[in-house]
Image (tube, grey):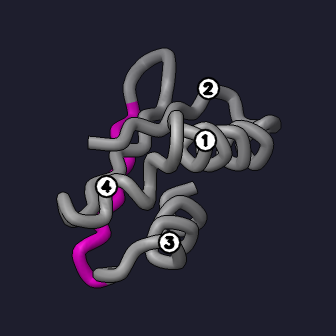
Amino acid sequence: MVELVKFIAQSLVEKPEAVDVREVVEDEKITIELRVDPDDMGKVIGRQGRIAKAIRTVVKAASAHSEKPVFVEIL
């Protein structure tokens, strides 16, 4: 999942080297933390959060067979 989110984010931003993706595994869930350059934050979130919602939808579909639910946080 980390590689998927990293690929999507790097495709969207102007500074792909500033993209940082980390996976935090907890008892009940997996959280993927996405950090980008502050100048690129709008490109990752999109108008009214549409791109962020699309990223979350893709990750949810890709993790459908996972034992734990996977969430994406944009920090």
- Which residue type carries mark 3? Leu
Look at the numbered disc 1 and give the secondary structure of its residue.
helix
Q: Report the Cα–Cα distance between label 3 and label 2.
A: 25 Å
Say which label, 1 or 3, has the lower sequence index: 3
Q: At numbered mark 4, what does the secondary structure look like: helix, strand or loop?
A: helix
Dot 2 lies on which element?
loop
- Image point (27%, 83%), residue name: 17
For the magenta stretch, what is the residue range?
A: 17-25
Residue highlighted by disc 1: 50
Residue on which the image places disc 4: 41
Position of 1 with respect to 17 (left or right) is: right
In percent of the image, x 75 and y 48: which residue is there?
Answer: 62
> How dense is the environment of label 2, judged by Cα within 10 Å: few (below 14), some, or many (20 and up)?
some
Mark 4 vs mark 3: which is more N-terminal? 3
Q: CA distance from mark 2 to mark 1?
A: 21 Å
Q: Which residue is mark 3?
A: 12
Tell me the CA gap for discs 1 and 3: 13 Å
- Which residue is at the far top? 28
Residue 27, image x, y percentages: 42, 18
Front residue of 26 and 60:
60
Q: Amino acid at mark 2?
A: Pro
Please name the residue that numbered disc 2 is placed on: 69
Residue nearest the observer in this picture, 42 or 61: 42
Q: Position of residue 38 (x, y in %)?
A: 18, 59
Please tell me which of labels 2 and 1 falls first in the chain: 1
Q: Which badge, 3 or 2, is on the more N-terminal residue? A: 3
Q: Quadrant of the C terminus?
A: top left
Mark pair 4, 1: CA separation: 13 Å
* Amino acid type of the residue tagged 1 in the rendering: Arg
Q: Is residue 2 left or right of residue 21?
A: right
Q: Residue at x 79, y 36 (%)?
A: 64
